[in-house]
Amino acid sequence: MHRVTWVLGNWKQNHRPAAAKVGAEAIADGVAEALSNPDPTAGEVRVGIAPPYLSLEAVRPYTRLDDTVVLLAQDCAAQDEGAFTGEVGPAMLRDAEVEGAIIGHSERRAYFHEDDALIAAKLRAVLEGGLVCVLCVGEALEARDAGEHESTVISQLSGAFSNVGPELVNERLVIAYEPVWAIGTGRNATPEQAAQMHATIRRWMGERFGSAGADRSILYGGSVKPGNASALIAAGEVDGFLVGGASLDPTSFLAIVRAAATTARPTA
Ligand code: 13P
């Protein structure tokens, strides 16, 4: 089967509305050309942008429901409404015509102390809310150096899915493997490291949820650039990218989209 290829730009705390509009317009203008010559093994390719909350409105005209460029939030509360100062939940995102949310990003885990229980609640809320959920997992450098990268990621998966039944595991669930040591460092995981971890994630998802789990798109994130995107895809198991820094430059982001769309996947 061909899994959906996703190329998602996580703008993090960058691009206030005026700059977001310019960036989104450039991406929307270039995306058709970037997707014009796909490799048949790439399957359906979907592009997404995750701006800061306050810039969602500025980006929305350049994204369309059910179209190629989707609009995502960078986080989502576990509850729809109530006395939760500062929070934005699934119902509010749906009202704003946001199609999905990133959950469990390592920056949220590290700087905002999000733990497995909170990420589990958010994951469930986003999926129950009918949104696309991009669940991020990834080990810190110490875990990698200690040979504990796989056990760390498996522990993050079992925490995040502790409260999710198979009925919520469908095409709206996307997983992103983002090793912390590769984020914003210019040091990407090698294609072999990414392929190996993606295979581990896929095996765990299959054991837990059967083929619905094993068939999920698994993205790689961490210093993805136009120059390394093709090699990461070509090693197999990588179904697209979650791009940080390079997504702020439309030319770089579109080059990554083009690489993801045109690189042949190895046949299994
Ligand atoms: P960089 O592409 O800047 O390394 O960031 C990756 C990331 O954290 C995307 O969510």
Image (cartoon, helix red, strand yellow):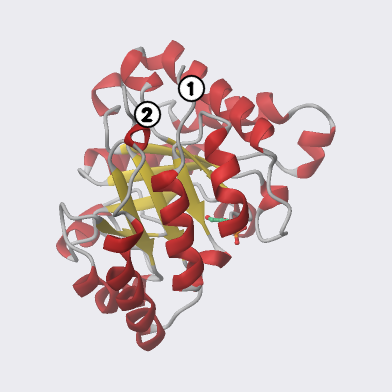
Would you place residue 140 above or below residue 245 in this image?
Answer: above
Q: Residue 129 carries which label?
A: none
Q: Which residue is at 30% across, 77% downward?
A: 25
Regarding residue 215, the answer to whether it shows in the image is yes
Quarter of the rendered structure image containing ligand 1:
bottom right
- Left or right of 177 in this view: 77: left
Residue 185 drawn at (x, y percent) = 72, 59
Left or right: 73 as drawn, with respect to 186: left
Task: Specify the amino acid type for callout 1.
Answer: Arg
Closest to the observer, 136 or 121: 136
Q: Which residue does the numbered mark 2 point to in the structure image?
A: 216
In the rendered image, the vertical position of residue 117 relative to residue 150, given as above or below: below
Picture residue at 19% right of the left edge, 74% below the top: 61
The residue singled out by tag 1 in the image is: 202
Q: Do the residues labelled 1 and 2 touch (CB within 8 Å)?
A: yes
Residue 137 image position (x, y, % from top left): 55, 39
Calculate the distance from the C-alpha at mark 1 to the C-alpha at mark 2: 8 Å
In the rendering, at what x and y percent does residue 159 appear?
A: 51, 30
Q: What residue type is labelled 2?
A: Arg
- The answer to whether the residue bearing label 2 lies less than 8 angstroms from the nearest atom of ligand 1 is no
Callout 2: 10 Å neighbours few (<14), some, many (20+)? many
Q: Taking 98 as reference, is 220 left or right?
A: right
- Viewer-side residue, 95 vs 216: 216
Residue 115 in sight from this viewpoint: no
Q: Position of residue 196 (x, y in %)?
A: 63, 25
Assess disc 1: are there few (<14), some (14-19) or many (≥20) residues with their C-alpha within 10 Å of its C-alpha. many
Does residue 188 lie above or below 264 as drawn? Answer: below
Q: Residue 84 versus residue 203: which sits nearer the camera?
A: 203
Above or below, 201 against 241 in this view is above
Image quadrant holding the N terminus, namely top left
Q: Which residue lies furthest to the right in this view?
A: 146
Q: Is mark 2 on a helix, strand or loop?
A: loop
